[in-house]
Image (cartoon, rainbow, N blue to C red):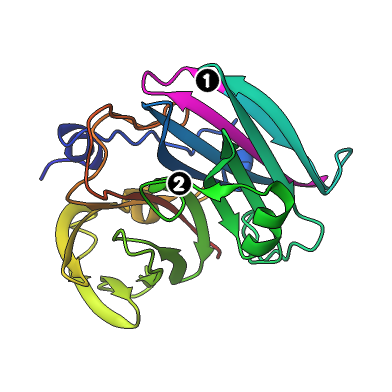
Amino acid sequence: MRDFTSCSSENGVQVTDPSSSNAVKVSQNLVICIYRCCIRGRTCLITVTWTKNLMGQCVTVEVHDSCNRTLCKVEIKPWLFTKRKGSKNLEAYSCNIDVLWDLSSAKFGSSPEPLGGFYVGVVVDKAMVLLLGDMKKEAFKKTNAAAAPGSSLGAVFIAKKEHVFGKRTFATKAQFSGDGKTHDLVIECDTNVSDPCLIVCVDGKILMQVNRLRWKFRGNDTIVVNRVSVEVLWDVHSWFFGVPSSPGNAVFMFRTCQAVEKTWSSTQVPSSSKPQSFGFTLFLYAWKNE
């Protein structure tokens, strides 16, 4: 059976191991979301990184060109020294880019990504290219911006990297199609039983089950979510054969058939200059709480 890395690389997505001793504590408290948009006729990527540490929450917004060069970057630290609401004006491709935010009423759970009560927006030449959060009316009122032409908000959600924790159940939310619908994704695995199996549920329905998991600790399969084919790749080797004093994490990747074409590691983002239909890739790093 091919290992997880080779399965990923053959299809244009590379997953790096986040469990190095120097990076584990940092990586466990971040969520990276990547969106594809068009600025002045050029394909660009907007990367939104949510992080959490002992000092509080932070969100970083970066705009990259199709060659992964950073065009502009804004780091927002609302729980430290920056205002919980504000905006910053930048310039790229000879046009004005405004990043605006209001996190004064943001509600957080266990994830660095807020649950609600906020907005983070990117406005290009007075058009709202990207708008996150549930305070959309407030964001449009603040900027007087119009929705980006060609789609509801202009940017397309193409990739997400997240860390999840649990004893036998690992849950998150995922978007597998361009209709904007969010699905409940649950991975179940009890490694303490004599013959553990891996179960993947979407919206409460079991779509995949891997038996004899100790022998099939790496592999791939395909599930169908609302008539969309989603390739699932898993590597749970560390759950069974990791060092007991320093247990590692399992890695899962969920990828729609129109997934991004180039590699994505902890320092790279996927990019493509070719028009595509909706494609989404979700990386999950699952850590067991004993």
Image x and y of residue 158, in percent: 36, 46
Residue type at numbered disc 2: Lys
**Magenta region:** 54-71
Which dot marks residue 50? none
Task: Identify the image quadrant of residue 200.
Answer: bottom left
- Image quarter where the N terminus lies is top left
Task: Write down the quadrant of residue 25 in the picture.
Answer: top right
Label 2 vs label 1: CA separation?
Answer: 19 Å
Mark 1, residue position? 70
Is 58 covered by the magenta stretch?
yes
Q: Is residue 72 visible?
A: yes
Is residue 61 inside the magenta stretch? yes
Under mark 1, the amino acid is Thr
x, y percentage for residue 64?
48, 25
Residue 24 visible at all: no
Write the residue at 53% across / 29% down: 63
